Every structure is written in structure tokens, then in C-alpha cells.
């Protein structure tokens, strides 16, 4: 997924006690228990690889599981906007059931060997709730999903604590800078506590860590977008399932088939823009000297056409024009393993006044 841009300090309050976050009705936890049989390599590439293997729920050798969580969405001012529930029954990458239920969106998705099926709303999960699944299942991206796959050790001071991190230098940088994309871990083991995208557009903290099936998972996940609260997730239930319980992931007769949807694409499969329509500069914005960048969340179908677009940041007088432009864009049809997929992307539409 394309991510970039500002905001850092506002997440520090939640990270200052990165090992001391308290959930409602739960006791403060000083540190998660260790994952057995795992050493912490000093080499950044090896440490990142170990981090992928022991953080999240979809990791090598994962056994079937069931999870139920509540989530809170926030408006653009960081105020609570809507709550919902997220539930998943996982038996494998192609055998699962995922359910989103909220006042404005209800959908259940079933993964099968014959494809994906859905009941309820057939559209995309609204942003930023669309981020929940990846944050829970696999919070650290694979190497081939990173624009710069060469990791380097760095530290970040988060509140009063300094955490060891893995950073990624930009195209013209020798070393990661403060605004570089990074993943930060506990000091003793590579348990993921914090991640940010380039320039801190996204910042996510992972708290109330527990060990489940000998890997770490966070019971509280908090995400900020351009420095403002956007999403919080609290895991209420997490339990193991038996393989013979896989009937829980069987789609009902009224489920409709649909394409696979992803938030992330390998760099080699990244979308290439084939058709781009320049935005019409709103006359009122131009006459008032208003310029800037509008960030748009868009979804492409399996032919590469943009099917939905929503402005999530930028000057209000520029947003409609930005969205209208993106709706006419077309990309190379996205594929994974040769199969077409629908993709959620974020794009920037720049409005610049020219003298």
C-alpha cells in the first residue's frame, strides 16, 4: 500500500509507556512473556526476518485460530466516529471467514479453494477499518513488498523510552533518517511495538502483547494518520481452533463470489499508472490562493480502473476536484500469482498555483 507524509509527536503519549498500556478491565503489563526458542540477532536483516516469524497470527506454522475484536474509527479531527466488531476464523490462507459489523457496514468474507465469497455489503471495507486485518495477521511486510528491502539498525526515542528499530533508507540516502519507514521492537526480543511509514503518515503502536501459539500478538492496536487518531482495535477473544472445525468457514448458500482484495502488493507487482486525468482547479480555491495536496484513498478493480475514491486529507475546497480526477485514473491490472486482484491504494493529488 502507498504510504507517506508527516506527524510524529501525537503518538508519543500512547508510546511513552509502550510496555505499560492498560486496557479497560485489564492489569498493567510491564512486558510480554518471552517466545521460547527465539534468539534476537544483531544483524538487521536477520532480526527483521525473525520479527516477521513471531509477530502477528499468520506466521509460518500457524495453527487454526479464532479472534474477536472491537474497533473504533475516528473522524478527521481525531474524535470518535463509529464503533464496530471484527471477527475472524482462520484455518489457512485459502480457508478463512472474516466478519465486519458496524452501523454503516456489514460484511462477511469466506476464503475457499474455489475463490472468495461474501455476504452482506459487497463493496470494500471502509478505510481505515480496511487496515485491521493486515495489522492483526501480518503487521510486518515481507521484503519484496518494501521499496527499499535493505534494513539497517536504528534507535527511536519514543517518549522516555529508546527502542531498537529496523529502518529503511530512502532512495538517495545512505542511512535511515528520522522520517524513514521503520519497525521498532522490545529490547529483549523482536516483539513489535511500533511502526511508521515514510514521513510518519501512518504510525501504529502495538500494546498489551500476549504470546499465542509461541508468537506475539497485540491486544491493543492504535493507528494515527498524519498525526491524528484514525483507528483503534482491542482484541477481546483469541482462541485456538481444531482443523475439524473448518465448517465454521463454509460460505452460506447466498454468498456471492468476488475477486480477492489486498492492501499490499509486492514491489514487482506495483501498480503503474496508465491513464491520469489532471484535476480541474476549483475557481474559488484559485481566486483565494488555496493550494496543497489532497490524499485520496481509492480502490481499483481487476481491470485496473478506479471504482471508488475518498479524500481523507487536504484542503476542503480542493477535495472534490481531487476525487473527481482520481476516479478517471487507470492502472495496470493488478495481479498476484497471475490472478487479478482488487487493490486499495493511496494517491496524492497536487494543486499548485502557477504565477
Image: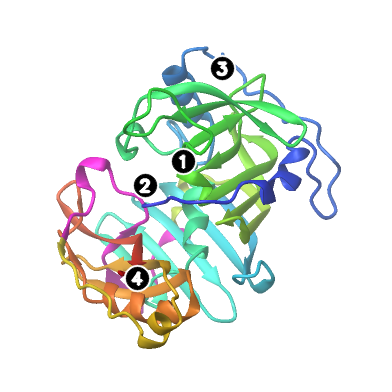
* Residue neighbourhood size for the residue with mark 2, other residues' Cα within 10 Å, grouped as few (<14), some (14–19), many (≥20): few
Residue mark closest to the camera, 2 vs 3: 3
Left or right of residue 115, residue 35 in this image? right
Q: Secondary structure beneath disc 3?
A: loop
Q: CA distance from mark 1 to mark 4?
A: 47 Å
Residue mark closest to the camera, 4 vs 3: 4
Q: Earlier in the sequence, mark 1 or mark 2?
A: 1
Q: Is residue 319 magenta?
A: no
Q: How many marks?
A: 4
Q: Earlier in the sequence, mark 4 or mark 2?
A: 2
How far across and down, in percent of the image, does residue 207 sit? 69, 42
Identify the residue shown where x is 35% and y is 58%.
111
Q: Secondary structure beneath disc 4?
A: loop
Q: Nearer the viewer, residue 327 or 353?
A: 353
Q: Can you identify the residue that label 1 sits on?
A: 58
Identify the residue shown where x is 49% and y is 79%.
316
Identify the residue shown where x is 35% and y is 70%.
353
Asked whether the viewer can see residue 253, the reply is no
Q: Quadrant of residue 149?
A: top left
Q: Can you identify the residue that label 4 sits on?
A: 353
Q: CA distance from mark 4 to mark 2?
A: 48 Å
Q: Earlier in the sequence, mark 4 or mark 3?
A: 3
Q: CA distance from mark 3 to mark 1?
A: 17 Å
**Contact between labelled residues 4 and 1, with CB atoms less than 8 Å apart:** no
Q: CA distance from mark 2 to mark 3?
A: 24 Å
Q: Can you identify the residue that label 3 sits on?
A: 38
Q: Can you identify the residue that label 2 sits on?
A: 93
Q: Is residue 251 magenta?
A: yes
**Contact between labelled residues 2 and 1, with CB atoms less than 8 Å apart:** yes
Q: Quadrant of residue 259?
A: bottom left
Boundaries of the magenta span: 248-273
Residue mark closest to the camera, 4 vs 2: 4
Amino acid at each position: 500500500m502507498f504510504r507517506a507524509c508527516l506527524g510524529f509527536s501525537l503518538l508519543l503519549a500512547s508510546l511513552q509507556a509502550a510496555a505499560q498500556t492498560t486496557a479497560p478491565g485489564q492489569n498493567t503489563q510491564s512486558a510480554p512473556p518471552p517466545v521460547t526458542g527465539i534468539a534476537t540477532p544483531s544483524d538487521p536483516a536477520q532480526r527483521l526476518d525473525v520479527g516477521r516469524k513471531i509477530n502477528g497470527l499468520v506466521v509460518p506454522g500457524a495453527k487454526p485460530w479464532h479472534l474477536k475484536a472491537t474497533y473504533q474509527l475516528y473522524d478527521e479531527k481525531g474524535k470518535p466516529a463509529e464503533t464496530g466488531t471484527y471477527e475472524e476464523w482462520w484455518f489457512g490462507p485459502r480457508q478463512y471467514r472474516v466478519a465486519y459489523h458496524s452501523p454503516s457496514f456489514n460484511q462477511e468474507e469466506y476464503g475457499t479453494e474455489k475463490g472468495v465469497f461474501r455476504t452482506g455489503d459487497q463493496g470494500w471495507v471502509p478505510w481505515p477499518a480496511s487496515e485491521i486485518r493486515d495489522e492483526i495477521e501480518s503487521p510486518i511486510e515481507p521484503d519484496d513488498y518494501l521499496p527499499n528491502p535493505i534494513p539497517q539498525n536504528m534507535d527511536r526515542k519514543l517518549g522516555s523510552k529508546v527502542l531498537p528499530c529496523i529502518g529503511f533508507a530512502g532512495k538517495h540516502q545512505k542511512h535511515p533518517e528520522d522520517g524513514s519507514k521503520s519497525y521498532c521492537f522490545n529490547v529483549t526480543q523482536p516483539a513489535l511495538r511500533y511502526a511508521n511509514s515514510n514521513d510518519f503518515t501512518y504510525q501504529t503502536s502495538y500494546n498489551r502483547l500476549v504470546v499465542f501459539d509461541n508468537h506475539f500478538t497485540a491486544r491493543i492496536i492504535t493507528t494515527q494518520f498524519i498525526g491524528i487518531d484514525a483507528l483503534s482495535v482491542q482484541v477481546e477473544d483469541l482462541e485456538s481452533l481444531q482443523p475439524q472445525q473448518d465448517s465454521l468457514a463454509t460460505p452460506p448458500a447466498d454468498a456471492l463470489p468476488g475477486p480477492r482484495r489486498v492492501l499490499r502488493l509486492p514491489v514487482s507487482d506495483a501498480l503503474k499508472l496508465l491513464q491520469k486525468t489532471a484535476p480541474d482547479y476549483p475557481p474559488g480555491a484559485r481566486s483565494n490562493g488555496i493550494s496543497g495536496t489532497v490524499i485520496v484513498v481509492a480502490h481499483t478493480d481487476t481491470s485496473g480502473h478506479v471504482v471508488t475514491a475518498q479524500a481523507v486529507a487536504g484542503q476542503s475546497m480542493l477535495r472534490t476536484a481531487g476525487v473527481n480526477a482520481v476516479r478517471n485514473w487507470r492502472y495496470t491490472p493488478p495481479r498476484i500469482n497471475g490472478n487479478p486482484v482488487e487493490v486499495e491504494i493511496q494517491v496524492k493529488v497536487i494543486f499548485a498555483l502557477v504565477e
